[in-house]
């Protein structure tokens, strides 16, 4: 097991993290007019409880978010909208900018403020993006509300391992943990990447990140895990990947190092497409590895012959890899929504289900926010549609299976599963 350590971010990382902190702090300051603050509303609610969801319902993420929302709705529907004496309502909020289709910091803060100011709110399901959670979490935590993300794998939300300055403490103004996530965190993805490299017989690796503060830690963790796994890390560079960026020098360094593979931690901007193509052209035998932030159908289609060397890790497994209860859920989903479900629906279903279970386990205190938070953190060996898991004290689940996709004929195709526990 790797020792925990605090990483001092590069200046550009520090700046970006500070900017996100200011956005969250600014939203909290504005919300002061409406009463959002540490230990704001009473912890005891009435018999009407509300669960909010905040996801990008427009743009490229709309399809995935729609599946998650429908999963949340299905879990509440199957519960009859009640847990004991408590009636539970549900509101789905959209944190995407209608002009860009991308999640928006201001809209995310507004969604969190809406949930925090509602005196019936018992839980907040979101966000999908780690940067969005970095904004919503301090606001939701300040109101003492349980927050569960179906994704948001950034390590600093729950751990100090290779995280940014003052993380994760800066996300919890109350001083108490109130956030959990269902998808495995980035530390698990790093372990899965090392297992992938082992399957591909990689012994010499080059690491690159795109300077995104939510991607740099994954590259750091991966580099450490690879070294511990007897894989020689020949270099780690942080580069700009905006459209028009020049990559010839970076490509020369990578190829000249003798690396068998490159791990790139970042997104799929047009610059990354160019980088991918240039790396493959310089060395067609070079393996190109990426994290789940690169699971983008357009990217897979645009990289041409570089796809033959591309492997991308993903926490989303084929439908048949989930328990029998998930197969029943898929059938119920088709019947209710008249569309084909994807495994993302399972994460929405389980997020709502574990909230309802926490309310149920709290008994007569099911309308007490702190009691529900406590019960969520007491989740142990829970049999769910995602598999059996527990919630660790830091909020991470113990789910540890990761998959790897290959790019075949311009399309992402599932390759195999790794247990990264």
Image: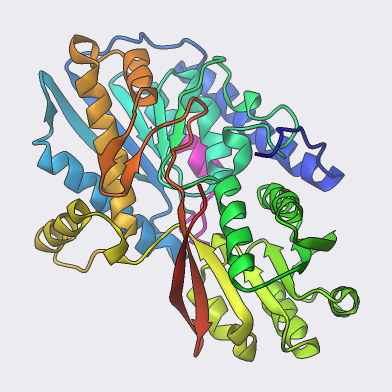
Q: Is residue 224 above or below residue 261?
A: above
Q: Is residue 99 left or right of residue 82?
A: right
Q: Is residue 53 above or below residue 247?
A: above
Q: Quadrant of residue 336?
A: bottom left
Q: Which residues are magenta?
A: 97-111
Q: Quadrant of residue 343?
A: bottom left
The quadrant in which the N terminus is found is top right
Q: Is residue 102 left or right of residue 163?
A: left
In percent of the image, x 73 and y 73: which residue is there?
A: 261
Give 118 or 265, whichever is nearer the viewer.
265
Give the percent coordinates (x, y) of residue 373: 37, 21
Give the percent coordinates (x, y) of residue 137: 52, 31
Q: Is residue 296 above or below residue 399?
A: below
Give the percent coordinates (x, y) of residue 81: 12, 34
Give 196 or 370, whichever is nearer the viewer.
196
In percent of the image, x 44 and y 39: which residue is there?
A: 398
Give 238 or 417, whichever is nearer the viewer.
417
| Residue 80 appears in the figure | yes
| Residue 238 appears in the figure | no
């Amino acid at each position: 097991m790797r020792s925990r350590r605090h990483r001092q971010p590069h200046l550009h990382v520090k700046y970006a993290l500070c900017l996100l902190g200011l956005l969250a702090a600014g939203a909290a300051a504005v919300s002061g007019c409406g009463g959002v603050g540490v230990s704001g509303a009473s912890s005891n609610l009435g018999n009407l409880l509300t669960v909010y969801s905040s996801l990008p319902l427009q743009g490229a993420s709309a399809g995935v978010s729609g599946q998650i929302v429908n999963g949340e709705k299905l879990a509440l529907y199957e519960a009859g909208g009640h847990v004991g004496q408590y009636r539970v309502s549900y509101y789905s909020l959209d944190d995407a900018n209608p002009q860009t289709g991308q999640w928006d910091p201001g809209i995310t803060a507004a969604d969190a403020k809406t949930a925090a100011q509602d005196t019936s709110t018992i839980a907040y399901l979101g966000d999908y993006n780690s940067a969005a959670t970095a904004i919503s979490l301090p606001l939701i935590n300040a109101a003492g509300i349980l927050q569960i993300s179906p994704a948001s794998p950034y390590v600093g939300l729950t751990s100090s391992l290779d995280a940014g300055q003052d993380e994760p403490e800066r996300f919890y103004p109350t001083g108490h943990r109130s956030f959990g996530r269902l998808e495995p965190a980035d530390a698990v993805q790093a372990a899965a990447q090392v297992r992938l490299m082992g399957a591909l017989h990689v012994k010499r690796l080059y690491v690159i990140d795109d300077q995104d503060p939510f991607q740099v830690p994954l590259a750091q963790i991966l580099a450490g895990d690879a070294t511990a796994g007897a894989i020689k890390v020949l270099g780690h560079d942080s580069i700009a990947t905006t459209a028009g960026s020049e990559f010839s020098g970076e490509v020369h360094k990578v190829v000249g190092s003798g690396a068998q593979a490159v791990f790139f931690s970042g997104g799929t901007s047009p610059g990354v497409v160019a980088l991918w193509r240039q790396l493959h052209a310089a060395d067609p035998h070079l393996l190109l590895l990426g994290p789940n932030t690169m699971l983008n159908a357009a990217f897979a289609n645009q990289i041409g012959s570089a796809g033959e060397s591309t492997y991308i890790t993903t926490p989303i497994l084929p439908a048949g890899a989930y328990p029998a209860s998930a197969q029943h859920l898929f059938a119920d989903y088709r019947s209710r929504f008249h569309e084909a479900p994807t495994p993302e629906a399972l994460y929405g279903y389980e997020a709502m289900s574990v909230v309802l279970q926490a309310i149920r386990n709290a008994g007569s205190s099911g309308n007490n926010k702190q009691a529900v938070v406590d019960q969520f953190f007491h989740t142990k060996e829970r049999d769910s549609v995602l598999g059996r898991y527990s919630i660790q004290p830091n909020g991470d689940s113990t789910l540890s299976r990761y998959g790897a996709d290959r790019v075949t004929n311009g399309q992402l195709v599932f390759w195999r599963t790794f247990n990264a526990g």
